[in-house]
Image (spheres, grey):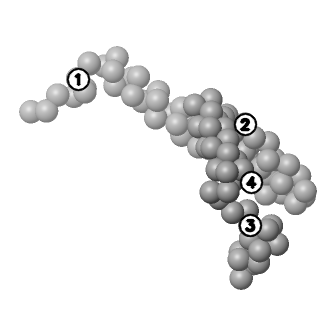
């Protein structure tokens, strides 16, 4: 016969049920928020999206430093004549296709 409660007894079962209920409430809140957001004017939706994306954009100092090192190395290679510059108009033409 299987035990009535998961390992940890009734307290563990209760905590699990509370977590499930909280998850359900969060999902309902997100659904409500999405419905409200969809009703916004396009400009307001763009601002909302920008705000959410901005809140996620937390630069990693190690990655930022790596980009600085790479950019400096490429610039030095360009000054030594090891890299050729490409005109912005040429780059734009490549990606307009």
**How many residues crowd around disc 4 within 10 Å: few (fewer than 14), some, or many (20 or more)?**
few
Q: Earlier in the sequence, mark 4 or mark 3?
A: 4
Asked whether disc 1 touches disc 3, contact meaning CB atoms under 8 Å apart, the reply is: no
Residue 87 in picture, x, y percent from top left: 79, 68
Q: What residue lies at 39% left-to-right and 23% top-to-bottom?
A: 14
Q: Earlier in the sequence, mark 2 or mark 3?
A: 2
Element under label 1?
loop
Q: Residue at label 1?
A: 7
Q: Residue at label 4?
A: 35
- Residue sticking out furthest to the bottom: 97
Mark 4–mark 3 Cα distance, whole angstroms, equals 46 Å
User: Image check: 95 left or right of 87?
Assistant: left
* Nearest to viewer (mark 1 / mark 3): 3
Q: Quadrant of residue 59?
A: top right
Q: What residue lies at 82% left-to-right and 72% top-to-bottom?
A: 89
**How many residues crowd around disc 2 within 10 Å: few (fewer than 14), some, or many (20 or more)?**
few
Residue 42 in picture, x, y percent from top left: 88, 60
Residue 38 in picture, x, y percent from top left: 79, 57
Mark 4–mark 1 Cα distance, whole angstroms, equals 40 Å
Mark 2–mark 3 Cα distance, whole angstroms, equals 34 Å
Q: Quadrant of residue 81?
A: bottom right
Q: Residue at label 2?
A: 55
- Seen from the viewer's position, the closer of residues 17 and 46 is 46
* Nearest to viewer (mark 1 / mark 2): 2
- Seen from the viewer's position, the closer of residues 36 and 68 is 68
* Nearest to viewer (mark 2 / mark 4): 2
Element under label 4?
helix
Q: Residue at label 3?
A: 86
Q: Earlier in the sequence, mark 1 or mark 3?
A: 1
């Amino acid at each position: 016969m299987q035990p009535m409660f998961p390992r940890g007894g009734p307290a563990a079962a209760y905590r699990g049920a509370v977590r499930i209920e909280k998850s359900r409430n969060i999902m309902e809140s997100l659904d409500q928020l999405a419905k409200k957001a969809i009703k916004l004017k396009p400009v307001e939706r763009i601002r909302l999206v920008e705000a959410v994306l901005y809140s996620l954009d937390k630069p990693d100092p190690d990655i930022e430093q790596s980009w600085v090192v790479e950019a400096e190395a490429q610039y030095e290679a360009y000054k030594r004549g090891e890299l050729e510059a490409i005109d912005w108009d040429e780059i734009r033409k490549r990606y307009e296709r």
